[in-house]
Structure formats: C-alpha cells, structure tokens
Amino acid sequence: MADTVIEKYVQAQEVDVPEDMFEEELRLLLIEEAHRAQYSSFLTGEFRILTPEEKSEAYEALKKIAYLNIKTELVIKNIIEDQHIEVTKEELEEEAYGISLRQNVTLEQIKDFFGEDLSALRQDVLAKKAEKYIRSLTG
C-alpha cells in the first residue's frame, strides 16, 4: 500500500481485525516471501540463510503488513457500505479499457479474463472509489 494518505486514514480508524483473517493474510505473506527468496536464489545463485534476529525482524514486519492489509480491506468495505458506493457498467467498461491499454491487449482479452460482464473487476473499482472518498476527506 503505497498511498500514505490512505494508510494514515486506515490507521486512525477503529476497526476490529478478526484473528482468523489476520492469520490467513500472514500465512499468505509468509508463503509469498518464501517464494520471493527462493526465486531470488535461483536468479543469483546465492542462498542466504537469515540469522534468528533477521528472521524475527522479517516476521514482525510481515505481521504489521498483514494487519494493515486486513484493516485496510475492512475500512474500505465499511466505506463502500456506509457511503452506498456503487459501480456502473460504464465504469467497469472504462476500467477494462484502461487495463487493456496498459497491458497492450484487446478489450476482448480483458473480458475473457474478467468475464464478459466484468464482474470480477467490480470490487477493485469499488475500492478505488472508496479510496477517492478517503482522499476527499483528507485533501
């Protein structure tokens, strides 16, 4: 999450982060980190073993990231519900078109990936609209 405005807003919110959601996010981050380290060792030919202190620091950093990821997801969900944010078919089409330009693929390829009705894009567009709402509050 590169947007510090959103991050500061999320950190200021009082939201309960369910332990099971946190644990699952942490598990996924640990897997991702292990894959990243393995891939790096394949690329460089170097295999680095972390010291116990480095492992502990990395684990604590991933715990913070997992917590913030879940809290952000919950805050965004609450904003979408509280502000009755919706997404139109036109907005989904616009997002799909933008993705097709950025990825240098056809709109049909995007629809093949996300579904003809682009419903798989809906949550991303809702989240962007909620983030825009947050920026309007803080800007």
Image: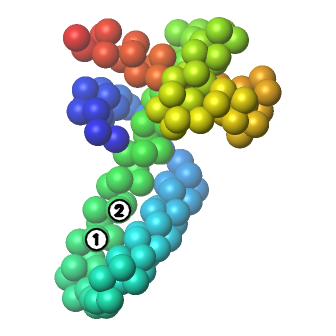
Asked whether disc 2 touches disc 1, contact meaning CB atoms under 8 Å apart, the reply is yes
Tell whether 68 sits left or right of 80.
left
Q: Which residue is mark 1?
A: 58
Q: Is residue 105 above or below residue 30?
A: above
Quadrant containing the C terminus is: top left
Image check: 17 left or right of 37? right
Residue 84 picture quarter? top right
Q: Residue at x 40, y 83 (%)?
A: 42
Relative placement, left or right, of 126 versus 32 is right
- The residue positioned 79% from the left and 27% from the top of the image is 116
**Residue 19 makes an appearance in the image:** no
Examine the image and state in which quarter residue 6 appears: top left
Q: Is residue 31 above or below residue 68?
A: below
Image coordinates of residue 106 in percent, x first then y, are: 64, 31
Where does residue 94 sit, x and y in percent of width and height? 58, 15
Q: Identify the secondary structure beneath mark 1.
A: helix
Q: Is residue 80 left or right of residue 122?
A: left
Q: In the image, what residue occupies the spot 47% across and 44% down?
A: 70
Q: Nearer the viewer, residue 80 or 19?
A: 80
Identify residue for label 2. 62
Q: CA distance from mark 2 to mark 1?
A: 6 Å
- Please state which amino acid type lies under the numbered disc 2: Leu
Kind of residue at badge 1:
Ala
Number of numbered discs on residues:
2
Above/below status of 101 relative to 35: above
**Quadrant location of the N terminus in the rendered image:** top left
Position of residue 60 relative to residue 122, above or below, is below
Q: Position of residue 65 (x, y in %)?
A: 35, 53
* Callout 2 secondary element: helix
- Residue at x-position 30% and y-position 82%: 44
